[in-house]
Image (tube, helix red, strand yellow):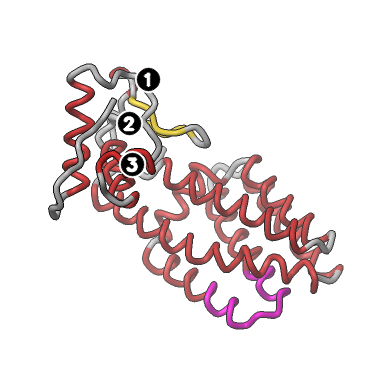
Amino acid sequence: MKFKSVERSPSLPEEIVASLTSALHAGELRPGDRLPSEQALATEFGVARTVVREAISQLKYDGIVQSRVGVGAFIAPPQERTAFRISPACFQKRKELLKLLRLRNGVVIEVAADAALARTKRDIARMEAILKEMREAIGDREHGAERHFEAERQLIHVIAKVADNEHALNFIVMIDSQIAEKLRSVAVKNTKATELAAVAIEEQAHLVEAIKSGDPVAARDQARQHYDNAAQRLADRADLADV
């Protein structure tokens, strides 16, 4: 299947949406088909990957495409297409949250390595206490998301403090303040939907274990794995209603 390059215009994502939708209506794409990668689509359409990404996000919002973590984007079967989606305003808030988290997480990944070299038994005890709070929050149906949201912020701040990098800590606190002031409700709802789960908490437990072992390479890798996964979980549900 080949797509024609689109002409430059202020609405390139919409043109890509229209092209993919036409291919679906023409039977060139069928329910269950996997879309080509972002890079492959960008090459075929002659645009940047960011343009393709925005188009795919719109198709998700319209219920035409579904994402599967680690697998790709697929044409949704008609009976599984999203009936209730969030408003455009909420969609924009989640996009803004994702941008802030990616900024913050890039710094956390780096300070995790420094923390592995500087940690003390007292530091590790504090991190393990925070992990315990996260695990207990899973069973708290009323306040679990809030508890986890606050505990994760504490863990990130502790890691930055242990790394003894005041510039990184100040940056992280600034980003968290932006989230708390403008996007707290969105962040807590996302925590409830994706992060208040054993798999997400165990990712953070592996990070703490790597810091505890004094291995900076493993700490950086575990931090990257968790925070990249968390960002992807948010991106994959950015067009779905909170439940």
- Residue at the image position 40 percent from the left and 54 percent from the top: 186
Choose the circle earlier in sequence order: 2 or 3: 2
Image quadrant where one finds the N terminus: top left
Q: Position of residue 205 (x, y in %)?
A: 73, 51
Residue denoted by label 3: 239
- Residue at the image position 62 percent from the left and 82 percent from the top: 166
Q: Which mark is residue 32?
A: 1
- Is the stretch drawn in magenta largely helix, strand or loop? helix
In this rendering, the label closer to the viewer, 2 or 3: 2
Q: Position of residue 230 (x, y in %)?
A: 54, 49
Q: Which mark is residue 65?
A: 2
Q: Is 34 a magenta residue?
A: no
Measured Cα–Cα span from mark 3 to mark 1: 19 Å
Q: Is residue 241 left or right of residue 21?
A: right
Identified by mark 3, the residue type is Asp
- Magenta residues, as a range? 157-172
Q: Position of residue 117 (x, y in %)?
A: 80, 71
